[in-house]
Image (cartoon, rainbow, N blue to C red):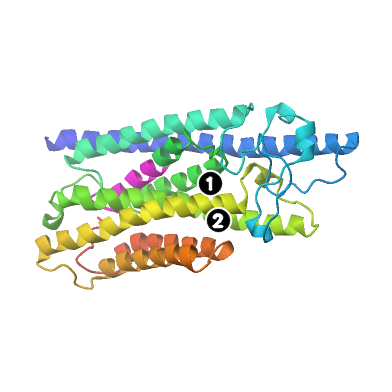
Amino acid sequence: MPFGINETMGQYSELFMLLAAGTYTVAFIAFAWDLAKSSKALRAVDLKAAQAGVAAKVPAVAGVGAGSAGARLDGPADRAERPSSSAAKAGGAGTDGVMTADGDMKYATERRVPARVAVALTTLAAVIHGAGVVTRALGAGRVPWGNMYEFLTTGAFLVAAVFLLSLIRRDLRFLGTFVVGLVIIMLVAASVAFWTPVGHLVPALQSYWLVIHVSIAVLSSALFTLTFAMSALQLVQSHRQKTVAAGGADKLGFMRLVPSALSLENLSYRINAIAFIGWTFTLMFGAIWAEKAWGRFWGWDTKEVWTFVIWVVYAGYLHARATRGWTGTRAAWLSIVGYLCVIFNFTIVNTFFNGLHSYSGL
C-alpha cells in the first residue's frame, strides 16, 4: 500500500479512536447515572417498606435477586450469600422497576433505562473503536499490535468486546462504570503517552508468531482487566457487608446493585483461570518465537522475566484459592497484585528497561 494511503488510514484510525473515546465517555456517564438512579430508587423502596411496617430495618448486604428468599449468612461477612430484602419484596420490582442481579448474575424482569442506554452507547463505541483498530491495521499493512500504542488500543477494544459479550449471558452491567472507565484510561494513555505513527516493524517482529503470541497476550490481558475490576469491587463489597452485618450504616447504597463479595470472587476466579491458560500459551509461544528469532528459548531478558513473574503470581492465586483456602479479601488482593504486575510489565518494563523486547515505538 502506498505511503500516502498508509498515512491517510492512520489518520482515519486516530479519528475513530477519538470518536470512540468520546462515546465511551457518554456511556460511562450513563452507567454512573444508572447506579445513582437505581440506588436512590432502592432507598425509596426501603423507606416505603419501613413506613408500612414490613421491616423496621433490612440488612441489605448485597442487594436482592428476583427469586431470592430468606437471609443466608452461613459464613464470615465477606463470604455471605446475597440475602433477600423484605422491603424489595414489598415493593415488587422496586421504584422504576429497579431490581438488582442475584448471586448468579442473571437478568431480572426490570426496567433500567439508563443501563440499557449505557450498554447501547458502549456497543456503538466498541464498533467505532473496532473501526479504528481495523484502519490502523490497513494503514500499517499488518496486525495492529506492533508497539505499545497499538497493543493498548487493541487491548482496550478487547476489554470492551469481552464485557459486551459477557452481557449476553450475565447481568454484569454493574461493572459498566468501572470497565468503561478503564477503557477510557487506556485510550487516553495510548494517545497521550504512547502514540506512535504508522510504520514498519523491526525485523524480529516480522513473523507469524507476532499474530499468535501477541494476540493471546492481548486477550489474556483483557480478561485480567475484567477480573481486576471485579476484585476491586469485591474488596469494597466485602467491607460494606462486614459494616452492615455489624450494625453499621450503609454508606454505599449503590453497591446494592452489585452481587455479593462471594459471587464476585467466584466469577473472578473462573475468568482468571481462563486468562491464566491464555497467559501460559503466551509464555510458551514467546519462548518458541525467541528460539526462532535469537536461537534460544530463554535468555533472562527483562520482559521474559516479568512475563514469567505474572504467570507465577496468577498460578499462586489459583493454587492458593483452590487448595490452601485463600478466599475472600486475600484472594482479591492477590488477583489485584497480578494485574499490577501486568501493568508494570507493559508500562515500566517497556519504557525504562533496555532489552531485546524494546519495541515500544517511543
Percent position of residue 49, x then y? 84, 36
Q: Is residue 46 left or right of residue 237?
A: right
Instruction: Please report the residue visible at 43 percent of the width from the left and 50 percent of the height from the top.
Output: 271
Q: Are marks 2 and 1 in contact (CB under 8 Å)?
A: yes
Q: Which mark is residue 245?
A: none
Instruction: Please report the residue visible at 31 percent of the width from the left and 67 percent of the height from the top.
Output: 308
On the image, numbered disc 2 is attached to which residue? 232
Counting residues from the N terminus, which is met first, the one under dot 2 or under dot 1?
Answer: 1
* Quadrant assignment for the C terminus: bottom left
Q: Mark 2 is on which residue type?
A: Ala
Percent position of residue 283, x then y? 26, 61
Most foreground residue, 332 or 176: 332
Q: Which mark is residue 178?
A: 1
Q: Mark 1 is on which residue type?
A: Phe
Dominant secondary structure of the magenta stretch? helix
Percent position of residue 15, x then y? 34, 34
Image quadrant of residue 112?
top right
Q: Residues within 10 Å of mark 1 (few under 14, many from 20)?
A: many
Image quadrant of residue 69?
top right
